[in-house]
Amino acid sequence: MNCAAVAVVGPRLSRYAGGTARQCSAMPIPGDSSGEPVRIPPGVTTLWMQLRGTTVIQSAEGRFELRRGGWLMLGRAAEPLLQAGHLGMCVGVCMSADTPTALGAGASPLYPGMGRMPRGDLQMATRLWRRIAGGRGTDVNRPTDPRPLLLLMAELQRDIASRAARCPGPSMVRKHHVLTCLQNACLFMHGHLERPVSARELAQWVGLPTRYFSEAFLAAYDQSPQQFGTRVRLEHAAARVRRGDMSVDEVAPAIGFKHAGTFLRAFRASFGVSLGNYCAR
């Protein structure tokens, strides 16, 4: 189980720990004044946690904006490009391919996905990340153990992991594989909030037949891919309106609705309340 801990602060990358020298040397470190985004090379599974401010992450799955307490886990093909805001701080762990499934007996594998950590979990995750970051210093041969942090993430992903049993497949190995594909599809929808994504496009993205994908998605999440994607876009729009980033007239076309009225009706149909009442909660 190899890992490397990294931190992105503003436009800069500081490399702090673990894994092999080969893995670490593959990660670019821009100069202090470069202001360039940081790209993680292919073949690396990554976990990112936002400690303060914001960070924009562009990957094969799409564009994501992490805010304080947000987390994002990406697979080996993601090749994330990170740009932290001026006061933003995002920390991460870069892992070898086997790490998410090598957490020990009784532990669920980790899945691609995103979410938010409660304050207490964020504080714990920060402490555990610092142990990884400070575990090696300049000694590339000193091992670091990411398992405490990853086991915390597995606990945060408990709801995701519980869906594996609903996935089709003759064995849990197959079910875990299907759920990983479905979670990648969920990330793709989160990463393309500007438009609806069809089930056919999602199925092609994750490498599953369209009908098989749609039926597996419905079984795992109790809603169709279209319903899931619409809800994700509407939740994102509500967050933008609540923060004052956009007005209703601005946010509707930003998530693929031609008219504000259509957007407002879709929101009420999905959430059972008006956008105004939802944002006032």
Image (cartoon, grey):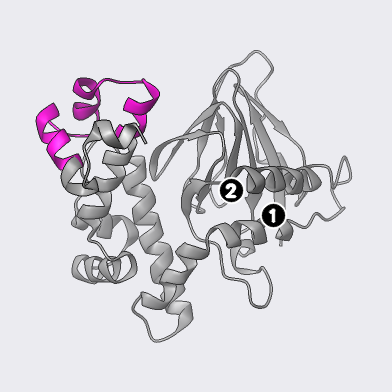
Q: Across the whole image, how many numbered discs are drawn on residues?
A: 2
Where on the picture, by quarter, is residue 273? top left
Along the viewing direction, whichever of 118 and 170 lies nearer the viewer: 118
Toward the viewer: 165 or 19?
165
Residue at the far bottom in the pictured view: 170
Residue receiving disc 1 = 149
**Does residue 100 lie above or below 268 as drawn?**
below
Q: Which residues are magenta?
A: 238-267
Percent position of residue 227, x then y: 22, 54
Q: Quadrant of the C terminus?
A: top left
Q: Are marks 2 and 1 in contact (CB under 8 Å)?
A: yes
Q: Is residue 23 visible?
A: no
Decide whether the magenta segment is chiefly helix, strand or loop: helix
Task: Classify mark 1: helix, strand or loop.
Answer: helix
Dot 2: within a 10 Å radius of its alpha carbon, few (fewer than 14), some, or many (20 or more) residues? many
Which residue is depicted at the point 36% across and 62% down?
A: 182
Residue 228 vs residue 137, the one in the foreground:
228
- Residue at (46% x, 53% y) in the render: 113
Label 1: how many Cα within 10 Å (few below 14, some 14–19, many 20+) = many
Q: CA distance from mark 2 to mark 1?
A: 10 Å
Residue 47 appears in the figure: yes
Q: Position of residue 30 (x, y in %)?
A: 65, 24
Does the magenta-highlighted stretch encompass residue 260?
A: yes
Vertically, is 5 above or below 2?
Answer: above
Q: Nearer the viewer, residue 125 or 101?
A: 125
Res. 148 image quadrant: bottom right
Q: Is residue 53 left or right of residue 184?
A: right
Checking the image for residue 47, the label placed there is 2
Asked if residue 183 lies in the magenta stretch, the reply is no
